[in-house]
Amino acid sequence: MKGKFITFEGIDGSGKTSQMEAVVEYLRSRGIFPVITREPGGTKIGEIIRDVLLDTRNREMLPETEALLYAASRAQHVKEVILPALMKGKWVVCDRFLDASLAYQGVARDIGIQRINEINRLATGGIKPHLTLLLDVKPEMAAERKGFRKSDRLEREGLAFYEKVRQGYLMLAKVEPQRIKVIDGGKSFEMVKEEITNVLEEFLSKAGGQKK
């Protein structure tokens, strides 16, 4: 693959969306115009699956069903959007990828890391992000930022569930510290942005200033 794949991870309310927008702006200032996408979703079929996953009427959804739906959306996403872009030498910036399934379904839903990896082996085709920015915040702070809004099915899970997700993410970061960079999302927007920019500067220097 000629392109670079950057993902954002973190629990709901960690500030991923606003920081991702800042990163895209930063990359553009460096002459890099990335493909911007998200999971679940990113494709017509993926967005339909997203609606099913987040619909509050689907409270009876089994953890296994949830995991398989995320993998199905990811399979479509990889083949239709991510892989073609990377093969063309483009950069891809994505809100969530496989790490989210490992943390949410693998750890918090107790399915297990190994089983989630097995489910997603076909879906990802072996593709992994070159860099993952993990915004780490405590669930209490994330809930306060959202104003305790619970608009979708997953957001209606309690703080204990999100603490499991958070610990799942931190465990993954310990396993792959070179790829997953933990950012203290509890700091101010500007401080978080500065820390992410420093990580990107180092990543760009290693990437040789590639522009696409």
Image (cartoon, rainbow, N blue to C red):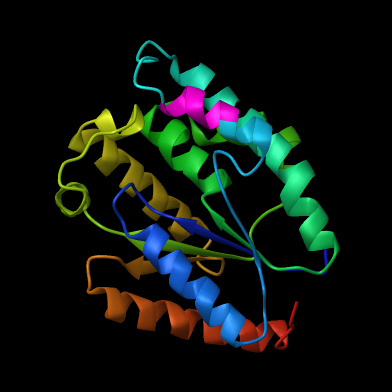
Q: Main secondary structure of the magenta part?
A: helix
Q: Which residues are magenta?
A: 48-54
Position in image of residue 178 (x %, y %): 55, 70
- From where the camera sits, is residue 125 visible? no
Indicate whether 210 appears above or below 141: below
Quarter occupied by the C terminus: bottom right
Determine if residue 143 is in view. Answer: yes
- In the rendered image, residue 50 lying in the magenta stretch gets the answer yes
Instruction: Determine the residue located farthest toward the front in the rendered image.
Output: 44
* In this rendering, position of residue 89 left or right of residue 161: right
**Residue 12's spot in the image, x, y percent?**
33, 47
Q: In the visual, does 59 lie left or right of 90?
A: left
Counting from the top left corner in percent of width and height, residue 70 is at: 56, 31
Q: Horizontal placement of 141 versus 134: left or right?
A: left
Q: Quarter holding the N terminus?
A: bottom right
| 182 in relation to 121, above or below | below
